[in-house]
Image (cartoon, grey):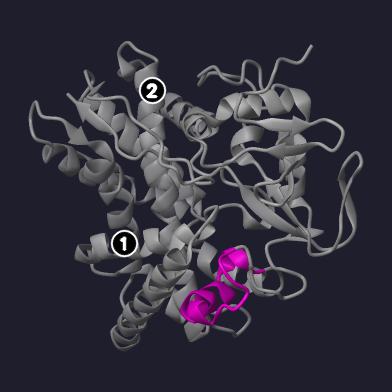
Amino acid sequence: MLANPPTYLAYDPATRRVRLDPHEPAFVQNPYEAYRWLHGASPAFFWEDFGFWCLGGFDSVNRLLRDRRFGRQNPGGVPDTRGTATDRRHLAAFDAIEANSLLELEPPVHTRLRTLVNRAFVSRQVERLRPRIEVLANELIDRFEPHAPVDLLSAYAAPLPITIIAEMLGVPVEMGPQLLDWSHQMVAMYMHGRTREVEETANRAANDFADFLRRHAKERRQNPGDDLLSLLISAQEDGQRLSEDELISSTILLLNAGHEATVHQTGNGVRTILAQGGDPRRFFTSPEATAKVVEECVRIDAPLHMFTRYAYEELEIAPGVTLKPGDLVGLLLGMANYDPLAFAEPEAFSPERTDQKNVTFGAGIHFCVGAPLARLELQVSLKTLFDRLPHLQLAETPRFRDTYHFHGLETLNIKA
């Protein structure tokens, strides 16, 4: 018999409708309790707080991510209206970035952009960054105040990926804090219950971010280097180059995606490993072991828990659940990674598991272009941290930020 749902979750079995406030503190701190119950009740359900059907089964999410009958681009061409108003004139700068974003486009435009951008992120190119990431990780740890608590997110998890992506793109590393501010303000647009203030702040950030990159791209056109921005400016596919707007949107996406999820995943991973107790170095005895630990960290506490798709034709996504063209569906990545039909003991941290897989980076044509870089940064940063500080402890119990569908800690105060 199915146990009672968590007290904050209401479920109607006749309609498979769920009431679950994504800002509910108990859910924010531990969404996996609700996911566990939903796997038993119905991994396909209508989430009333969002207003669309959601899928949480691993096979369903994995399959639909690859299904070309679904996509990121609204088939009706109608802008996202889940904010504060249907009139989006106050979001002109933000929408201009989104209109040319690789993340929001479908073929054939997506294919051309992805081909141009992907050249810098193939695994063999990324692997060359390993020595630089190791040096940077050690430099950041050297700056920790001895025997004093330190917020690992601001002192380590955030500066490492933003420095690497800034160096790759050839933008000033000292702009890192400003880039982070712009990025945080823009990604707030994707969270549940955004306000008019959030929208206006995101629009200003998009405008300022774009102006900064246009100035920098102009300088790079006059004085090209061996950085990614110069490569994007000069790259061609079948005689076509990125337009100015495509260049700006692609660069902003790479900067935002190049650190946002990695920061969350680094913090989540450190928290997970410390929760195992004992000497953390036992998990990092070889490159192969380190890679397995990272994959298990990525599965067991993913930094992104929902990714949406539009239906492009009338489709049945689960028994008795049919979507019409233009309907949104939520793919619950964090829930899929805990599917008991796909994983033995899904809540157990087990780097050696034989059923190791996850949908954290997505799948299909929108599979995260930066996944090789994220994996490398996590492998190097986690191993270096625990090799250098094997007696690391939590200085206080960390709490997750109220930012569903992003899943990351507010702070991670540690002491050596």
Q: Position of residue 360 (x, y in %)?
A: 57, 41
Q: Which mark is residue 181?
A: 1
Local packing at callout 2 (Cα closer than 10 Å; few below 14, some 14-19, many 20+) is some
Q: Give the residue drawn at x 68%, y 38%.
A: 19
> Can residue 8 be spotted in the picture?
yes
**The residue positioned farthest toward the left in the image shown:** 146
- Residue 160 on image: x %, y %: 28, 48
Q: What kind of secondary structure does the magenta stretch mostly adopt?
A: helix
Is 135 above or below relative to 395? below
What amino acid does circle 2 point to?
A: Ile
Residue at position x 17%, y 24% in the image: 416
What residue is disc 2 on? Answer: 273
The structure residue drawn at horizontal position 31% and vertical position 84%, both measured from the top left corner, is 215
Residue 176 is left or right of residue 62, and the answer is left
Image-based side of 10 in relation to 170, left or right: right
- Report the span colored magenta: 83-105
Q: Is residue 66 left or right of residue 218?
A: right
> How many C-alpha atoms fall within 10 Å of the one at disc 1: few (<14), some, or many (≥20)?
few
Q: Answer above or below: position of 127 versus 254.
A: above
Q: Give percent across and percent down for residue 207.
A: 39, 78
